[in-house]
Amino acid sequence: MILSYKGWRNCFLFCLGLFIGTAFCMKWLETRFYFQGELFTIIGLEISYPAERIMSILYLADPAVQTLLKAHLYFDFVFMAGAYGGIASLCMMARYKVKKNRLRQLLLAFAWLQLVAWGCDIRENLFLLQWMSAKPYIGTTIYVYHLYVLIKWSLAIAGILLSIPVLCWKRNG
């Protein structure tokens, strides 16, 4: 199916609605993420916390907090559709604005690469959900987990940084 610029814009707006709605829900849930009297964050779990802290949070947090964290991760699956679908739509909208074939191909590639980023984000959430239910020693699996996080963020940010300037500066087709 080939969409026009207007079709991709409509797809983007739908994804933006998913993104905003689920982001609001997830942010509200995050205000209740306390472990040992301190607030923890999803970004911390993704990027900055060492394996020992991640295990402590996932395994020893209050059952109510674990339930909220699971709900957050399930909301995140819907959020992903909005985020990666929106970035892919931005890339395709930008593709309609340029005439240079290489840039058009690059934008198309980054639109498709959002599927890879989405897959990495799904796997990242599945790691957390599995760790919460099975409570294994994370060990070196944390490096694989962080690799998924790195790939996800790199592809998403690259898609945004490539498409938005084109959309802002290329007003004419």
Image (tube, rainbow, N blue to C red):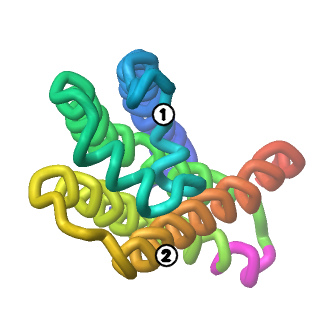
| Disc 2: which residue | 147
Q: Amino acid at mark 1?
A: Phe
Q: Is residue 7 left or right of residue 168?
A: left
What secondary structure predominates along the stretch shown in magenta?
helix
Where residue 97 sits in the image (x, y, percent)?
Answer: 74, 56
Above or below for 37 versus 41? above
Q: Is residue 81 visible?
A: no
What is the quadrant of the C terminus in the image? bottom right
Residue at left 23%, top 28%? Answer: 62
* Residue 122, quarter of picture: bottom left
* Residue 60, quarter of picture: top left
Q: Is residue 47 visible?
A: yes
| Disc 1: which residue | 40
Residue at left 19%, top 51%? Answer: 132
Where residue 13 sits in the image (x, y, percent)?
Answer: 48, 31
Between 130 and 108, which is closer to the camera in this rendering? 130
Q: In front of the other: label 1 or label 2?
A: 1
Between 155 and 12, which is closer to the camera in this rendering? 155
Where residue 21 sits in the image (x, y, percent)?
Answer: 39, 21
| Residue 104 belongs to magenta span | yes
The magenta segment is: 100-105
- On residue 67, which mark appears? none
Q: Secondary structure at mark 2?
A: helix
| Residue 113 belongs to magenta span | no
Q: Is residue 97 left or right of residue 10?
A: right
Q: How crowded is the residue under tag 2: few (<14 C-alpha within 10 Å), some, or many (20+)?
A: some
Figure disc tally: 2
Residue at left 67%, top 54%? Answer: 160
